[in-house]
Amino acid sequence: MAPSNTVVSAVIPAYNAAQFLSETIESVLTQTFEDWELIIIDDGSTDNTAEIAEHYCKKDSRIRLFQQVNQGVSTARNTGVGLAQGQFIAFLDADDRWLPKKLATHIEHLNLNPQVGVSFGRVEFISYGGKPTGLIASTRLTNLRAENFLYNNPTITTSNLVVRREVFQQLPGFDQDMSYSEDMEWLFRVLCNTQWKIEGLDHVLMEYRITERGLSSDLYRIEEGWKKLIAKAQENAPKLVNQHYPLAQATHLRYLARQTLRLGLPPQVGIDFMTRALRSDWTLFFKEPRRTLVTSLAVYGKYLFAGFYPNFKF
């Protein structure tokens, strides 16, 4: 068992994660900052996730495996937080990778800025096969307010977060009824209910794997997750949510419309998301004209093209 003065506890929730789990664990082992423990939560996997984790437990005493019946990613992360002994808690999904200076950079940032409760960095997207895409997420890093998390997630992914233990001592963990937008909901509560700041660093510190899934139903599940986020946020700050809701919904639906293009989904799906985005708040054209115009032209253009060439495979 890791000593009680461990600096960082890394938590990996893993469900049927055998395909990429070794890569993910190796990215922790290559950290330049070495005072860490790694807690792998096997959330009822039916593949050989546990076998892979046990191999690494034998290889390095800083790694621990905890197994539970399947309860979802939020419960798995909360279980990891409960087991963590570190001063800081870092999350890593079982198909993502950290770059070697990830922990060292965040620990320095948090030590130099005692008012920051959650630290994050830039994210590079990698292909499903693990190859760099050259795409780096461009999001807001500083002066974040609660309402920013109603529109999108500046942190991109939970794998990007390093959190002070005190934040979890002040605030309940991830909502166990949520498996989409659960990180945005928790971060919204941090800014609404505590004095901690959430602040990013202009350094690429992790690699986020792009999913191979391309079903329309996946995007509609993401939309349902966002609706749960809004419902939960309304319990915390109803006036704030009501003020931002139309434009936040429009922004989220535009994001989903863009995803239909990336995933090569039928044109009608993109039309549905983009049309509802503009109905929610047409001023999106003035707030973010370039992104809104480009997305609209691409989505509606694809629909028109399909009308002229119905047998064309997108």
Image (cartoon, rainbow, N blue to C red):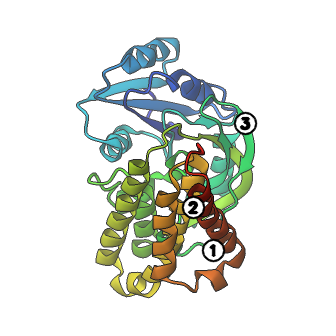
Mark toward the viewer: 3 or 2: 2
Mark toward the viewer: 1 or 3: 3
Q: Is residue 161 above or below residue 127?
A: below
Residue drawn at x 44%, y 87% is: 243
Label 3 crowd bin: few (<14), some (14–19), many (20+), radius 10 Å:
some
Q: How far across and how far down the image is residue 85, in percent?
A: 42, 39
Amino acid type indicated by mark 1: Asn
* Residue nearest the observer in this picture, 87 or 236: 236
Q: CA distance from mark 3 to mark 2?
A: 31 Å
Residue drawn at x 38%, y 26% is: 16
Q: CA distance from mark 2 to mark 1?
A: 39 Å
Mark toward the viewer: 2 or 1: 2
Q: Which element type, helix, strand or loop, lies under badge 2?
A: helix
Residue drawn at x 64%, y 30% is: 130
Q: Which residue is mark 2?
A: 303
Label 1 crowd bin: few (<14), some (14–19), many (20+), radius 10 Å:
few
Label 2 crowd bin: few (<14), some (14–19), many (20+), radius 10 Å:
some
Res. 220 image quadrant: bottom left
Amino acid type indicated by mark 3: Pro
Res. 173 image quadrant: bottom left
Q: Is residue 210 left or right of residue 19?
A: right
Q: Is residue 59 visible?
A: yes
Q: Which residue is mark 1?
A: 143
Q: Please say if the residues under marks 2 and 1 sit with CB atoms less than 8 Å apart.
A: no
Q: CA distance from mark 1 to mark 3?
A: 30 Å
Q: Is residue 6 above or below residue 170?
A: above
Q: Which element type, helix, strand or loop, lies under badge 1?
A: loop
Q: Which residue is mark 3?
A: 132
Q: How far across and how far down the image is residue 54, in percent?
A: 41, 15
Q: Earlier in the sequence, mark 1 or mark 3?
A: 3
Q: Is residue 268 left or right of residue 175?
A: right
Q: Earlier in the sequence, mark 3 or mark 2?
A: 3
